Amino acid sequence: MSPARLPLVPPQPGTTRILGATVIDGTGAEPLEDIDVEIRDGVITSVGATSPAASAADVVIDGRGAFVMPGFIDTHVHVTMPDASSHEMALWFAEEHSLATADIMRLTLEAGVTAARDLSGLTPGFRNAVARGWITGPRMHMSIALLSPTGGHADPSHANGTVAPYVAWEPIASGMVVDSDDEVIKAVRTLVRTGADVIKVCTTGGISTPTDSPDDLGLSEHQVRLIRDELARRGGRPIASHAQGHEGALNAVRGGTTSLEHGYDMSDELISALLAHGTVLVPTLSTLSLAPDPTKKSAEVVAKKLEWQERGRDAAARAISAGVMVAMGTDAGIFPQGRNLTELGHLVDAGLTPLQAIHAGTQAGARLLGLDDHIGTVRPGLLADLVVTEVNPLARIHDLADPAAVEVVLQAGAARKDRSGRAAGLGA
């Protein structure tokens, strides 16, 4: 697979030093206390014990009493889905929806997520806008759209021929309906041409889909393999598979998907396949754990959600216990925007230690995106995408669900958030 595209952000020029912090580096290693982190022109240059003889800095951040971690990576978001009703959004102009998306990206960044993978809906223009400094937001990887057969999870059409209201405000369709192998290949080539970093497929239906269910099948194992081979011919890109039911999840893993999104029905056979293929599980427990609203959802959908909540929690716990690789992903958009680190607490509840959950949200996510040579750990040579908090995440990881617990967010050394004034001088 060719090196992944690093989404750029404007770096902070000059030298910054964070003094006397406790560093949790994202690798799963134990914390290091009373540590200085030096940053030059947006890149970490040293991480070591506090020394009065250290070089001078343009900006000094007092890290005493604080914890420094890598910026978090949410590997499953939908930032084009605001926390607003379909009726409200139906009255918006296109520019209002674009501005709402930009605001969600800002909120996501301020929650401590410095890089994210949008798995349908976002277009490359937003990635470009962050690089140019026009808006603030995470470094974005994106699928642009998701692929499913007619009547599948990506099909916006209702039984009477009308389409879901979100279709009206999408500059590029977030769902692509493909049935034949030729249609699959053409869709993949179109998405690669448009600038997709990852191809998302639906090998099952969904809990919230009106015309299918998690146990219904989507793209076949053969078609996932077809996509994998086509991507290998075009420089290499990962595949993310929406898969909630068991058989479709097996199809995805055996076909060569890079990550299994959701995985809410976990048999011993599927666990063995995940381990054998080195497939990463993104369990999206934040969305799974949402209580269904009976005033907004039909009784059938509510019952389906409650059933799959129980199955999904058990699935994540069994996969974690077996040693399946896990990366953090929230399905934000279905889950409320700007509370992304809620997922860390859910991962701990499912069986990870706090250090393992932080690893899932940092280095493991960076590896899944192919960016671990650039971000995801606190070490020299990597970009200074960092978060600072007074919350001890090893003792109170659930508290990070509140974005107010994240005091400072640095992105390439530039302060994108500074609640406490620790990063005064970096232009937050």
Image (spheres, rainbow, N blue to C red):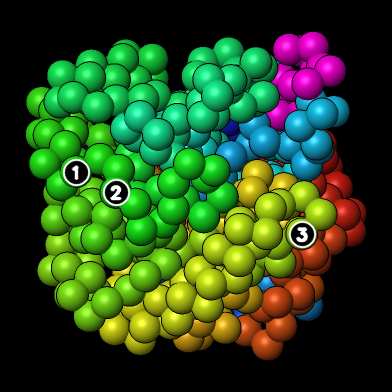
Q: Tell me which corner region of the image, top left, top right, bottom left or bottom right, holds residue 122.
A: top right
Residue 121, how many percent across, how many down?
A: 54, 29
> Label 3 vs label 2: CA separation?
27 Å
Mark 2: give few (<14), some (14-19) or many (20+) Cα within 10 Å: many
> Label 3 vs label 1: CA separation?
33 Å
Mark 1: give few (<14), some (14-19) or many (20+) Cα within 10 Å: many
Left or right: 249 as drawn, with respect to 272: right
User: Which kind of residue does numbered mark 2 sit on?
Assistant: Leu
Residue 73, how many percent across, how many down?
A: 53, 53
> Label 1 vs label 2: CA separation?
8 Å
Contact (Cβ within 8 Å) of mark 1 with mark 2: yes
What secondary structure predominates along the stretch shown in magenta?
A: helix
Please state which of the two labelled residues, at mark 1 or mark 2, is closer to the viewer. Answer: 2
Q: Which residues are magenta?
A: 90-102
Left or right: 16 as drawn, with respect to 285: right
Q: Which element type, helix, strand or loop, lies under badge 2?
A: loop
Among the two numbered marks 3 and 2 on one chain, the one whose residue lies closer to the N terminus: 2
Residue receiving disc 1: 220
Among the two numbered marks 3 and 1 on one chain, the one whose residue lies closer to the N terminus: 1
Q: Is residue 248 visible?
A: yes
Q: Tell me, for residue 294, which label it has, or none.
A: 3
User: Which kind of residue does numbered mark 3 sit on?
Assistant: Pro
Residue receiving disc 2: 217
Residue 165, how many percent across, how many down?
A: 67, 24
Residue at screen point 17% across, 68% down: 273
